[in-house]
Image (cartoon, grey):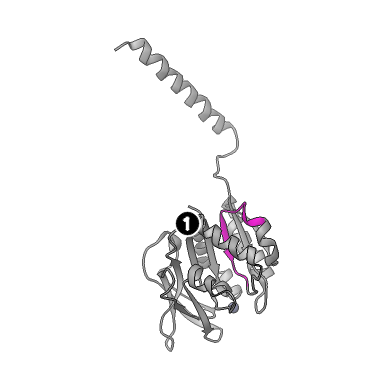
Amino acid sequence: MNLKNTLIPLLSVILVLGISMSLHAKGKPFHKKPIKVLMVGGGSSHDFDTWYKGADVATLEKDGLAEVTYTDDPSTILQYLGDMDVLFLANNQPIADEATRQAIFAFAEAGKGLILAHPAIWYNWNDWPEYNKTIVSGGSRGHNAYGNFNVDLTEKHPVTKGMPKNFSLDDELYYFKVDTDGPGIEILANASDEKTEPFPSIFIVKNPKARIVGIALGHDAASHELDAYKTLIRNAVKWVSK
Ligand SMILES: [Zn+2]
């Protein structure tokens, strides 16, 4: 072995590493690029500006985790979606445009991340059954009157990491039913009270390509200001964007 031939490349590598480490040390702290999220809200029955555009966007953008574009106009989804890592649907209004519907399916097919929050897991659109079947693998057609119920985590998962194993809150307990013709779901948490059987509250849709998290919670302040919920949506954005 020729020592000179081995030593010179080795010394060059050490030199380059040293220079790049000292550059990092002198420059700004090294952060990963923020995850690009498109959040869609708007529609009836909820204060979307306060709890999604306001509270949730702040929760997700804290410490540079995500960069969120919020819209309450579904006709703008198409212009933003191409640039996004994650589509966070919380809309309580129809997405009627055919090209936008196709783009959402193509986004899932491309293996991107989706979060389906509160109204987005409702059976909201009679003329778009493929959404509930394929993207949500089910949906909700009713819920308990707003009030207190329990949420119980069912297994350890990165999406629920750091959340209490059991907690209670005031919200709407959605009667989420799985569509067995869809890809199916993996339940991460159930919601129940003394009178109500457990229903899936936090779950993963077993889409073959995309990472999809469903979150039934989110009617108003009682969820959006809860630490467990904030932890959940940050985890969910991280996990679906991988
Ligand atoms: Zn609601």
Under mark 1, the amino acid is Trp
**Quadrant that contains the N terminus:** top left
Closer to us: 41 or 112: 112
Closer to us: 160 or 178: 178
133 lies above or below 64 = below
Quarter of image, ligand 1: bottom right
Range of residues picked out in magenta:
80-91
Query: How busy is the neighbourhood of tag 1: few (under 14 within 10 Å), some, or many (20 plus)?
Result: some
Q: Position of residue 124 (x, y in %)?
A: 59, 78
142 lies above or below 86 = below
Residue 55 lies within the magenta run: no
Q: Is residue 70 left or right of residue 208?
A: right
Residue 90 lies within the magenta run: yes
Toward the bottom, the furthest residue is 195
Whether residue 234 can be seen here: no
Toward the left, the furthest residue is 1
23 lies above or below 8 = below
Q: Position of residue 10 (x, y in %)?
A: 40, 19
Q: Is residue 200 left or right of residue 46?
A: left
188 lies above or below 158 = below
Which residue is painted at 53% across and 71% down in the image?
Answer: 130
Disc 1, ligand 1: is the CB inside 8 Å? no
Q: Position of residue 53 (x, y in %)?
A: 66, 65
Q: Is residue 235 left or right of residue 27?
A: left
Q: Which residue matches tag 1?
A: 239
Closer to us: 223 or 237: 237
Which residue is painted at 58% across and 58% down in the image?
Answer: 60
Closer to us: 84 or 190: 84
Which residue is painted at 44% across and 66% down in the image?
Answer: 204
Q: Position of residue 85 (x, y in %)?
A: 56, 53
SS category of the residue bearing label 1: helix
Toward which corner of the image does residue 146 lie, by quadrant? bottom right
